[in-house]
Amino acid sequence: MSVDVRLRQRLGAFALDVAFRSDASGVTALFGPSGAGKSSIVHAIAGLMRPDEGRIAIDGRVLFDSNARVNLPVEERRVGLVFQDARLFPHMSVRDNLLFGWRRAKDRSSEADISQIVEMLGLGQLQSRKPAHLSGGEKSRVALGRALLSSPSLLLLDEPLAALDASRKAEIFPYLERLRDVARVPIFYVSHTVDEVLRLADRVVMLRDGRVDGEGSVFDFAAGEIGELRAATGAVIDARVEGHRPDGLSVLSFPGGVLSVPHTPALPGSRLRVRIRAEDVLLAREEPRAISANNVLATQISALRAEGPSQVDVHLSCGGTKLVARITQASAARLGLKEGEAVFAVVKSVILDPHALRGMGALE
Amino acid sequence: MSLSDAEIQALLLSLRVSSAAVIAALPFAFAAALLLARRNFPGKVLVDAVLHAPLVLPPVAMGYLLLVVFGTRAGLGGFLFQNFGIRFVFNWTGAVLAAAILTFPFQMRAIRLSLESVDAGLGDAARTLGAKAFDRFRNVTLPLALPGVAAGAITAFAASLGEFGAIITFVSNIPGQTRTLPLAIYTALQTPGGEAAAARLATLSILLAVVFMAMAEFVQRRARARFT
C-alpha cells in the first residue's frame, strides 16, 4: 500500500504546497494547527477540491495528475471520507446509511464483513433508527462504518472527533483504535490534537502554513524529532502483553526491554500502546537499587537538546526504542552526560490508555 | 347546499385546470429551485426577480401578455397552431397555461426552501460513496426536497383554483371550457337572480382554499418532525 500526494494550490492569500508519500498501511496522521492546510489536502485527495497542479495516486492508481490531465471524479475515486459533521442522510435509517456506499461499490465486501463492521462499531442495536435519533458519538460511528463499507482504497478521517465533547471523544476512541487494528485500508487521520496522534497514528506528516514541516514515525513524533514546531516530547511504545504477575502488575515487553505496569485486563499476547512522558523519566549513571520505581531501563544517549534556558531533553535509545528524559541542564552537567554514553532511565510512570483496553474484549 | 349541473361543471373544470397547472409547472419549478438554491452566478438577483414576477404582476396584465405571445395570430401561438394544431386561446389548456405560470413561484419557493434546509454537503458525502449525479438526485436530493414539493404543489393548487384575471383575459369565459369557479361566480353575479349561486360557489371556493392550505402546513410539519 502506498499513497502519493503532491499538490499545489492557491486559495486566496493561502498557498498550499505539499508532497509526501505514505507506504505504511496503518494510520498516517496529518497533524498541524488549524489553517495548516490539512482539510484542503484531504478534500483534494477525495476530489472535492481541484488542486492547481500536482499528482495524487494510491497504489499506482492515478486519481489526479495535472500534467497527464487526469482528474477522476469523486464518485470514481474509491476514497472514503468521514466528515467532521458526519453528514448522514437524514431520511434513511442507520442501516441504509451504512449500506449506501456498499451498494454502489464495485468489489464490495461480503455480507459477513457487514455484520463484522456493524459489530466492531457497536451499531447492532441502532440499525433501524433515523440519524435524528442518534447521539453525536453514534453519528460518528455510523459515518465511519458507512465509509468503511464502501470498500475504499484509502480512508480519510477529517477530524472526526472535532465536533464532539470530551466524553463523546472518549466514547469513540476505542472504536477508532479497533479500526486501526483491523482495517486493511490505509487511513489518513487529520488532527490538531497531539493526544489523538499519539494514540492512533503509525506515521505522522506535520503540516504548517500549507507546507510539510516534517514527517516520520509516531515514535519520532513523540520524541519531538520531526518538524520545527515540536509538538510532543516523550515516548510511544507499542508493547506486547506478556502476562500478569501475582503481585498485581502486568508485564509488557518491547524491543528494548520489559516494563512492569499496573494491572491491565488486556490478554497476554495482545498489543498495547503505552506512553512515557519526558518529565516522567529520571536518569542515573549507575543502576539504582533501592528505589520505588518499577522500571529501570538500560539506555544509550543518542542526542542532547537544550529546551529553554534551564532544561535539556536527553534522547535515549533503548534497544532501538526511543525514549526522552527532560532534566535540568544543571543535572546534565553534574552527571556529565554526553552523546553515545550509557545511562539508566528510571521510569516513574507509564500511561496506559484505559480506553484502549476495552477494545481487547467485548465492549459493553 | 346542492349544486346545479353548470356549477358542478365549473367545479370539476377548476380541479382539472389546477391539477394540470401544478403538474405542468412542477419540473420547471424544481429546476429553478435547484438553480437558485445550489448555484451562484452573475445576475442571480435578476433571475430570481423575474421568476418571482408572476406573484406581483397584475393577473390581467399577465393574461394580456399571454394573448400577445400565444394568440393564434401571434408569433409563438401562431407557430404552434399552424405546425402542431396546438391552440391555447378559448381552450381549457390556455387556462392551464395561465394558472401554471401564475402559481409557478409558489412551487419554486417551497422547493427552494426545502432544498436550502438540506445540507449541501450531503451531496458531497454521497459522491464520496460512489453516487453519480442522477443517483444523488434520485436518492438524496429528491427525497429530502419531497416535503417542499408536496407543500408547494398543494399551495399552488389552491392558488390556481382562485385564478381569475389572467384566465378571463387570455381564454375568455366559456362554459365547460374555461369557466372555472371564480369565473362562474363572476358570471352568476352578472346574471339577474344569481346571488344565491354566487354565494354557494364562493363558500365552496373558500372551503377548498382553507382545506388545501391546512394540508400544505400539515405536510411541512410532518416533514420537519421526520428529519430533525
Image: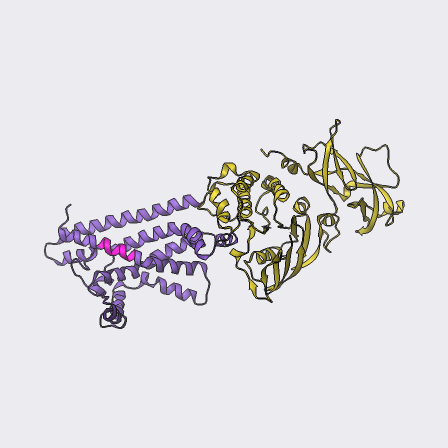
Chain colours: A yellow, B purple
In the picture, measured across the screen, residue A160 lies left or right of residue A318, that is left
Q: Residue at horizontal 40%, vertical 66%? A: B46
In terms of image quadrants, where is residue A43? bottom right
- Which of B164 and A106 lies nearest the eye of the viewer? A106
Q: In the rendering, at what x and y percent does residue B126 appear?
A: 49, 52
Residue A209 makes an appearance in the image: no
Q: In the rendering, at what x and y percent does residue B154 appear?
A: 31, 51
In the picture, measured across the screen, residue A356 lies left or right of residue B197, that is right
Compared with residue A190, is residue A171 higher up or lower down, i.e. above or below? above
Q: Is residue A210 magenta?
A: no
Compared with residue B127, is residue B79 higher up or lower down, i.e. above or below? below
Q: In the rendering, at what x and y percent does residue B118 appear?
A: 45, 52
Q: Residue at horizontal 11%, vertical 57%? A: B191
In the picture, measured across the screen, residue B159 lies left or right of residue A165, that is left
Compared with residue A73, is residue A136 higher up or lower down, i.e. above or below? above
Outermost residue toward the top in this view: A246
Q: Residue at horizontal 61%, vertical 43%? A: A179
Identify the image quadrant of the C terminus of chain A.
top right
Q: Residue at horizontal 81%, vertical 51%? A: A305
**Prevalent SS, magenta region:** helix
In terms of image quadrants, where is residue A295? top right
The boundaries of the magenta stretch are B14-22
Q: Is residue B18 magenta?
A: yes
Residue B85 makes an appearance in the image: yes
